[in-house]
């Protein structure tokens, strides 16, 4: 039997605030262990937390771009557990009054993955296992997080990865997080259960903790599917438990029985006042949101006439989109800038991380100048492309790189070149005169070759047609 996989994700995303959620310590990634800490974020007696307003604003923005309802009243609670990554023995989180409720992410197949809630909480420190010892680094403790809880609406590993990619793109575009899985600023817990196709209730789930790459998410799901399937098919029952995933073996193993909300002894955090937002504040945050990747891509396709695939590649990165818009500003055809970016520039800047950062040696204004030279007929497309490669290698502008003769179309006598081509390619010329339109290509090619690609193609074609119609 093929079982149906039911998946719900709990995704933790670090917010891009400069300082931590309850103190002024930096949130910068890395740093010597235990140097980004103070009495507040290490939970020393007598210290008092103060909620970082920026963290709340980012969390509201996250809720808005994920189609959530923003609750005008929410509050912080203490969630108790004992583990060395958290010196206070409780995490400040939100329990029954989260900041955002209801929302969704839409997949390419049109299915909606509903979001139950988004709440704000603090991150914990990091344990480092070294030489038989366990060390703890509290630099990450107190970094603001949002936890995005999905409904159990996901049905496969592919859907889980697509959902996460969509979260990543959307939250990055909104400017609330860099969502770098390799740095742990986006990580997720996978809840998974199986049921017989058509069954109306869900099976018992397991939760696999702290996955930090798309590959691990997919592989943990596949492995857990097989494990639960084997249990069910041999007549057993799946125990509800928390499991860990081992990236080396690709397997999951039991960590502990599942805790219930009761075990956490949630109660209200008395040191932090409730979060109260007005409609005006929420609307102002909505108005400050940039255009999101999906909308941007649609506009590129529908309004600018960019091919779908190119539009998607550009809209995927916020900085590349901004760059493209600046480079194509008031050019005759934005398609040219789009093509140059996704071909020449993307092969030069080829990793995801570098495209995300987007610090090309050619400024948007320099690319625009090059395109304008081409559109003015001063250089043809081939020369423009070659020049762009040289610009990328040297960091120089088109004006610096192109010699006066390359820039001077007068240096190319189109009429003389065309006459010469006709004389030297008599067969093609007579074919064309006899009605074979395609023969013109050979003549255009001859002119291009002779001019070493510098003759403006449109002018050459017009001139050849005119000369050939005369006799
Ligand atoms: P807890 O907070 O105890 O982990 P929740 O009820 O909040 O439990 O659910 C956590 C996650 O588990 C949610 O993403 C939810 O969609 C998912 N989930 C709940 N029940 C199931 C199930 N039977 N199979 C798969 N996922 C589930
Ligand atoms: Mg959970
Ligand atoms: Zn601190």
Image: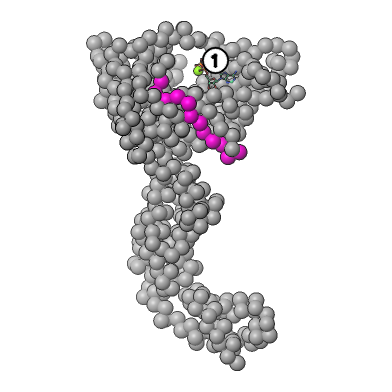
Q: Which residue is mark 1?
A: 242
Position of residue 152 relative to residue 257, above or below, is below
Determine the residue positioned at 69% across, 15% down: 231
Image label count:
1
Residue 452 falls inside the magenta stretch: no
Determine the residue positioned at 46% across, 39% down: 169
Determine the residue positioned at 58% across, 26% down: 153
Mark 1 residue element: strand
Pick the quarter of the image with the C terminus: bottom right
Determine the residue positioned at 54% across, 55% down: 307
Q: Is residue 68 left or right of residue 194?
A: left
Residue 31 image offset from top left, x and y in percent = 33, 29
Q: Is mark 1 within 8 Å of ligand 2?
A: no
Highlighted range, magenta: 98-109
Residue 29 image offset from top left, x and y in percent = 36, 31
**Viewer-closest of 146 and 200:** 200
Residue 4 image offset from top left, x and y in percent = 67, 25
């Amino acid at each position: 039997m093929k079982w149906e996989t039911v998946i719900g994700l709990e995704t933790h995303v670090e917010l891009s605030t400069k300082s931590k959620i309850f103190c002024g310590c930096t949130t910068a990634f890395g740093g010597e262990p235990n140097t980004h800490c103070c009495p507040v974020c290490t939970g020393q007696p007598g210290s008092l937390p103060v909620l970082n307003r920026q963290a709340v604003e980012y969390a509201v923005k996250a809720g808005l771009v994920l189609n959530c309802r923003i609750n005008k009243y929410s509050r912080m609670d203490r969630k108790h557990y004992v583990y060395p990554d958290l010196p206070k023995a409780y995490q400040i989180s939100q329990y029954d009054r989260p900041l955002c409720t209801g929302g969704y992410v839409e997949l390419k197949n049109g299915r909606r993955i509903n979001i139950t809630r988004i709440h704000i909480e603090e991150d914990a420190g990091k344990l480092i296992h070294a030489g038989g010892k366990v060390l703890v680094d509290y630099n990450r403790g107190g970094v603001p997080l949002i936890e995005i809880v999905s409904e159990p609406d996901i049905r496969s590993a592919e859907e889980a990865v697509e959902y996460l990619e969509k979260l990543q793109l959307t939250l990055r575009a909104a400017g609330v997080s860099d969502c770098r899985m390799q740095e742990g600023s986006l990580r997720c817990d996978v809840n998974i259960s199986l049921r017989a196709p058509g069954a109306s209730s869900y099976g018992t789930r397991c939760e696999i903790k702290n996955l930090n790459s798309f590959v691990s998410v997919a592989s943990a799901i596949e492995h857990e599917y097989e494990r639960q399937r084997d249990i069910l098919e041999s007549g057993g029952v799946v125990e509800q438990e928390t499991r860990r995933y081992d990236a080396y073996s690709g397997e999951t193993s039991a960590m502990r029985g599942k805790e219930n909300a009761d075990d956490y002894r949630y109660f209200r955090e008395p040191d932090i006042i409730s979060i109260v937002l007005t409609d005006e504040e929420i609307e102002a945050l909505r108005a400050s949101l940039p255009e999101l990747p999906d909308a941007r891509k649609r506009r590129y396709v529908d309004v600018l006439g960019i091919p779908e695939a190119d539009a998607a590649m550009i809209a995927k990165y916020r900085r590349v989109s901004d760059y493209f818009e600046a480079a194509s500003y008031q050019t005759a055809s934005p398609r040219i800038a789009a093509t140059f970016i996704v071909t020449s520039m993307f092969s030069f800047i080829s990793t995801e991380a570098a495209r995300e950062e987007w610090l090309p040696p050619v400024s948007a204004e320099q690319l625009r100048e090059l395109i304008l030279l081409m559109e003015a007929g001063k250089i043809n497309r081939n020369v423009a492309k070659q020049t762009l490669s040289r610009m990328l290698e040297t960091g120089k502008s088109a004006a610096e790189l192109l010699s006066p003769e390359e820039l001077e179309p007068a240096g190319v006598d189109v009429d003389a070149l065309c006459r010469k081509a006709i004389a030297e390619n008599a067969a093609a010329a007579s074919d064309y005169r006899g009605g074979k339109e395609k023969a013109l290509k050979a003549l255009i090619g001859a002119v291009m070759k002779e001019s070493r690609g510098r003759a403006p193609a449109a002018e050459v074609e017009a001139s050849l047609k005119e000369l050939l119609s005369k006799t």
